Image (spheres, grey):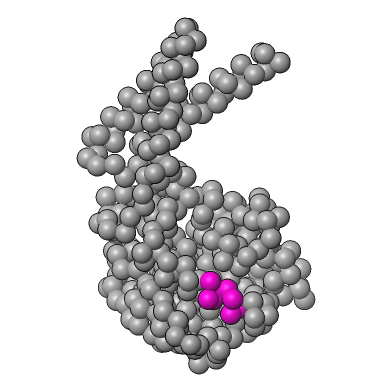
Amino acid sequence: MKRFFRILCVIAAVLMVAFSAAAFHYSTILPIWLCTTLSIAYPLLLAAAFLQKRQTVRRGASSVLLLGFWGWYLTDPPRNDRDWSGEYSLPADAVLKGHIAHIQHIRNFAWHTESTCTPAWYDADYDVDTLSGVDLITSYWAGESIAHVFLSFAFNTGQHLAISIETRRQKRFPYSAIAGFFHHYELFYVTADERDLIGVRTDFRKERVYLYHLDLSPATEKRLFLSYLAEIHSLTHTPQWYNTLTDNCTTGILTRAQAQWRYRLDWRVLLSGYTASLAYDMDFLDRHYDFPTLKRMSRIHRPAGAVPDAGYSQEIRKGLPDE
């Protein structure tokens, strides 16, 4: 047992050294030289403390270093006042008055290529009582295991509002999947016109995009939409950290939907490319087909050279199940 315990301690020490190095490396600490220095110096000091032969010195030094690290990491605050990348520069806000949801700063970028666009936003009112459906969108850029997942809300008025839970990136940072495990990105709800949020993926990035109509009761649809609105408003004054493991595009949907924990802990939550199959097993998708058939039928196909126009929302739904 002593040997087993020692092995566990060694593994924990190695993981802690690696975690601290990455946490400082991906932190938002300024100036950058301080961030770099801490990412090198702190892990070395911690490793040296763990390797001390004298037990009192080892315990004392490692305790001080660990308390200092976790004291910083757990109190490191997310912020809304950084120099954001253009896509995330203007957050939406949502105010509910009676049954009318007034949403400010709905993103509607006019994309020219997969990385260039003309920024634009607009405000709009949505009558919650006219909510008529919720669609699950999964977008693949490589392989089957990882996809970006988000929802779009439809109304009897013909309006569609797409909401995507994403990382809020600063201009100085490139996107990094590893960075999302640490305090590197704030949480951001991209609230956008479908021509922007879905159109850039289908028509410019040429990703494989699937649209599934969710089979939800009207009461569940309304509760889900209101939950999104509440979180959008909350983030305008109480920012949160994004976390690839615990608070990402998929876990955020399940949280807003108040899903049971057995679904939140499903392996498909982390491997987001299989989120639609999870929704299928939860009886939220059309069960008239087996899932492989439903997935094949739910892919959005766009003509060569197509660009999102005023009829985009109707065009992408032609021929899809339940549409």
Above or below for 187 versus 19: below
Residue 322 in picture, x, y percent from top left: 66, 82
Viewer-side residue, 94 vs 151: 94
Can residue 301 be seen here? The reply is no
Q: Residue at x 27, y 56 (%)?
A: 82
Furthest residue toward top:
54
Viewer-side residue, 16 vs 65: 65
Q: Looking at the magenta stretch, what is its main secondary structure?
A: helix
Q: Which residue is drawn at 39% across and 58% down?
A: 239
Can residue 266 be seen here? The reply is yes
Which quadrant of the rendered structure holds the C terminus?
bottom right
The image quadrant of residue 179 is top left
Viewer-side residue, 229 vs 142: 229
Q: Residue at x 36, y 49 (%)?
A: 77
Count of marks placed on residues = 0
Above or below for 196 versus 62: below
Q: Is residue 188 left or right of residue 318?
A: left
The image quadrant of residue 318 is bottom right
Q: In this view, does 106 lie to the left or right of 282?
A: left
Residue 47 in picture, x, y percent from top left: 43, 19
Q: In this view, does 82 lie to the left or right of 182?
A: left
Which quadrant of the rendered structure holds the N terminus?
top right
**Residue range of the region highlighted in magenta in the rendering:** 221-227
Viewer-side residue, 228 vs 68: 68
Q: In this view, does 7 lie to the left or right of 231?
A: right
Residue 127 among those drawn in magenta: no
Q: Which residue is drawn at 57% across and 21% down?
A: 9
